[in-house]
Image (tube, grey):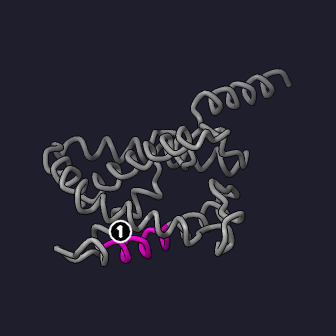
Amino acid sequence: MSRWFVYFLFYSLGGYGLEKLHARLTHSPRQVRKCFLLLPLCPVYGMAMTALAALAPEGLGFLPLTLLGGAVCTGVEFLVHLFYDKVLGVQFWDYRLLRGHVQGRICPQFAAIWGLLSAAALMWVHPLARWTAGILPSWVIVPLWVVFAVDCVLSAALLRRYRDTELLALGAALAQMRAVSQSSTSL
């Protein structure tokens, strides 16, 4: 079980890096991360890659792995977007401007990108994830779970209350909490 959690964290951290790189390369006006947690993690990447690692048969070639990865990652992306939208009342991405989108949650262009990236990651990066999971001492896992769980609770509370994804930049979250505490003490 701890191995899968390490995979999840490994790919969530990698996804955070990809999001930051994408924002910089595309000169996006939104340079803040597009993910759920205050920590530098994008759980949609972690969930998608962990699911793919669990589902992909060993020794699958690049093309079948690309197709499977595209399907698995896009399915996870759809479900995560649905959760963010319906449960937390926020949207981190919107593909409505892209052709072939489904409810703005997924689109064929990103399904193809996810397929290629996930196949490459499973073939060439996953050995590093496996190695990382193998060298982490077992006593580290429980504190990682605790930090992750606390972050999930705090992030979900911020999003449900304010419905503002920009608050997940730590500075913005702290400023909002200060403003709320100052307004409640001035009453």
- Residue depicted at 52% across the width and 64% down the height: 110
Q: Examine the residues drawn in magenta and state their main secondary structure.
A: helix
Q: Amino acid at mark 1?
A: Ala
Check the image and report above or below for 14 versus 126.
above
Residue at label 1?
51
- Would you say 1 lies left or right of 167 here? left
For residue 186, which quarter of the picture? top right
Q: How far across and down, in percent of the image, does residue 153 sit?
A: 53, 48
Q: Does the segment drawn in magenta span residue 173? A: no
Q: Which residues are magenta?
A: 65-76
- Would you say 47 lies left or right of 74 here? left
Tally of marks: 1
- Would you say 17 lies left or right of 36 here? left
Foreground of the two, 181 or 93: 93
Q: Residues within 10 Å of mark 1 (few under 14, many from 20)?
A: some
Q: How far across and down, in percent of the image, does residue 129 sit?
A: 23, 52
At mark 1, the secondary structure is helix
- Residue depicted at 47% across the width and 50% down the height: 42
Q: How far across and down, in percent of the image, does residue 53 sit?
A: 28, 67
From the image, which quarter does the C terminus lie in? top right
Foreground of the two, 55 or 142: 55
Foreground of the two, 19 or 49: 19
Farthest right residue in view: 187
- Residue depicted at 49% across the width and 73% down the height: 75
From the image, which quarter does the N terminus lie in? bottom left
Q: Does the segment drawn in magenta span residue 66? A: yes
Q: How far across and down, in percent of the image, does residue 183 sit?
A: 80, 26
- Would you say 36 lies left or right of 181 here? left
- Residue depicted at 48% across the width and 41% down the height: 21
